[in-house]
């Protein structure tokens, strides 16, 4: 069996497992090392200290799996059809919560890693049945020090756009990516990684907090996704109003991207929105105690922010909400129960609400 024949079989298996596309890339030192080191030197990674660790592995992932020589890359669509139309109207409802579309359903890490392992099982069975030697692989999806978007780009799954997301001519950007590092000597797929962003700057212009320093360069310290998920610190006061009702992540730069008119809606049940996260009243979410939060976020990426981060984010959104005496009462009642970090944001929210009273 030739490598090209096995590639074709892998692409079929990948689609059967729910992946939209699969590509292949030889593992070698990345040409993005200078860009990564420059980005880190400017402090654009904020408090994400892990980004500055294992840089050598990020630029040469062969060290993550001894004997690996190539990677199988995959992408998986995640946006439910009904969510496409709901994005802009929801952002205009300040008393309801906006959650990044990728986090409305099951935690993608679990879904993609599980299916990558099943893909590896399929490959292993084929190789064993045909007595083609040993096979080993490691599944990764946003879980190892890898320049994932660069690997996906080099494998032909798309190009890295001005908003630093991977874009695909046929699939936009509403998708997850993952990799199987493997010892199979696959050559890189024919690359379609040439940028097709042209002179468009919609993604850069729409960013609520102006987090883009320029095309292809993001200052994470101003990014709403960083501020509401990764950061465990106080949200800068000068950025709070711009966050609006976004309590977990942000999709604005994807919402305006022209290539997303080609995005395919997912039919995967794992990514269907949970009712409690889809356009729910901010006050309802803020009233959850920690036990309720943990129960409601079981198997969800939202748990990543932690309960204190959840309250912090909601307090900012409630400060941006339309005046409501019930919101004021809720904020004041919660204030004595929280730590200093959350209290700071609640005090700010109370002041914002009182100004509108």
Image (spheres, grey):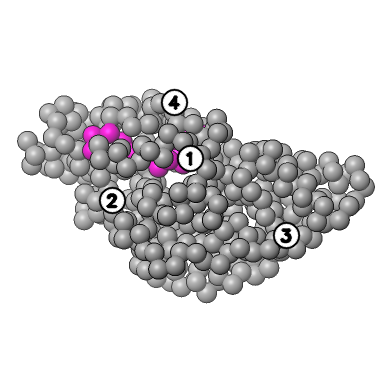
Circle 2: element type? loop
- The tag earlier along the polypeptide, 3 or 4, is 3
Is 137 rendered above or below residue 113? Answer: below
* Residue beneath disc 2: 235
- The tag earlier along the polypeptide, 1 or 2, is 1
Question: What label does residue 295 carry, if any?
Answer: 4
Which quadrant of the view contains residue 112?
A: top right
- The tag earlier along the polypeptide, 1 or 4, is 1
Whole-Å distance between the Cαs marked 2 and 3?
41 Å
Q: Please provide the residue range marked out in magenta.
A: 94-107
Circle 1: element type? loop
Q: Position of residue 343 (x, y in %)?
A: 23, 40
Whole-Å distance between the Cαs marked 1 and 2?
28 Å
Whole-Å distance between the Cαs marked 4 and 2?
26 Å
- Verify CB contact (< 8 Å) between mark 1 and mark 2: no
Circle 4: element type? helix
- The tag earlier along the polypeptide, 4 or 2, is 2
- The tag earlier along the polypeptide, 1 or 3, is 3
The residue lying at 74 percent from left, 50 percent from top is 137
In magenta stretch: residue 95: yes
Q: Residues within 10 Å of mark 1 (few under 14, many from 20)?
A: many
Circle 3: element type? strand
Is the stretch drawn in magenta largely helix, strand or loop? loop
* Residue beneath disc 1: 79
């Amino acid at each position: 069996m030739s490598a090209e024949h096995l590639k074709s079989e892998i692409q079929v298996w990948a689609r059967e497992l729910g992946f939209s596309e699969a590509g292949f890339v030889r593992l070698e030192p990345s040409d993005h090392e200078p860009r990564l080191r420059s980005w880190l030197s400017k402090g654009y990674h904020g408090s994400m200290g892990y980004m500055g660790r294992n840089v050598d592995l990020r630029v040469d992932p062969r060290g993550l799996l001894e004997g690996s020589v190539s990677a199988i890359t995959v992408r998986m669509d995640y946006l439910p059809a009904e969510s496409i139309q709901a994005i802009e109207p929801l952002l205009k409802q300040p008393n309801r919560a906006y959650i990044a579309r990728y986090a409305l359903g099951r935690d993608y890490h679990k879904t993609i890693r599980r299916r990558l392992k099943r893909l590896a099982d399929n490959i292993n069975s084929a190789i064993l049945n045909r007595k083609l030697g040993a096979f080993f692989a490691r599944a990764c999806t946003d879980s190892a020090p890898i320049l994932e978007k660069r690997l996906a780009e080099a494998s032909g799954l798309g190009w890295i756009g001005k908003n630093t997301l991977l874009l695909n001519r046929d699939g936009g950007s509403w998708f997850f990516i993952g990799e199987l590092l493997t010892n199979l000597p696959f050559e890189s797929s024919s690359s379609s990684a040439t940028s097709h962003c042209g002179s468009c700057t919609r993604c850069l212009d729409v960013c609520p907090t102006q987090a883009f320093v320029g095309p292809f360069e993001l200052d994470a310290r101003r990014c709403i996704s960083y501020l509401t998920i990764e950061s465990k610190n106080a949200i800068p006061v000068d950025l709070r109003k711009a966050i609006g009702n976004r309590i977990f992540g942000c999709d604005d730069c994807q919402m305006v991207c022209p290539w997303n008119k080609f995005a395919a809606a997912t039919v995967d049940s794992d990514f269907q929105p949970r009712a409690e996260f889809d356009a729910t009243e901010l006050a309802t979410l803020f009233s959850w105690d920690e036990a309720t939060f943990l129960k409601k976020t079981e198997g969800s990426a939202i748990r990543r922010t932690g309960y204190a981060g959840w309250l912090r984010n909601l307090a900012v959104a409630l400060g941006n909400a339309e005046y409501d005496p019930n919101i004021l009462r809720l904020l004041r009642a919660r204030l004595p129960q929280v730590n200093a970090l959350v209290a700071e944001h609640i005090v700010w929210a109370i002041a914002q609400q009182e100004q509108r009273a």
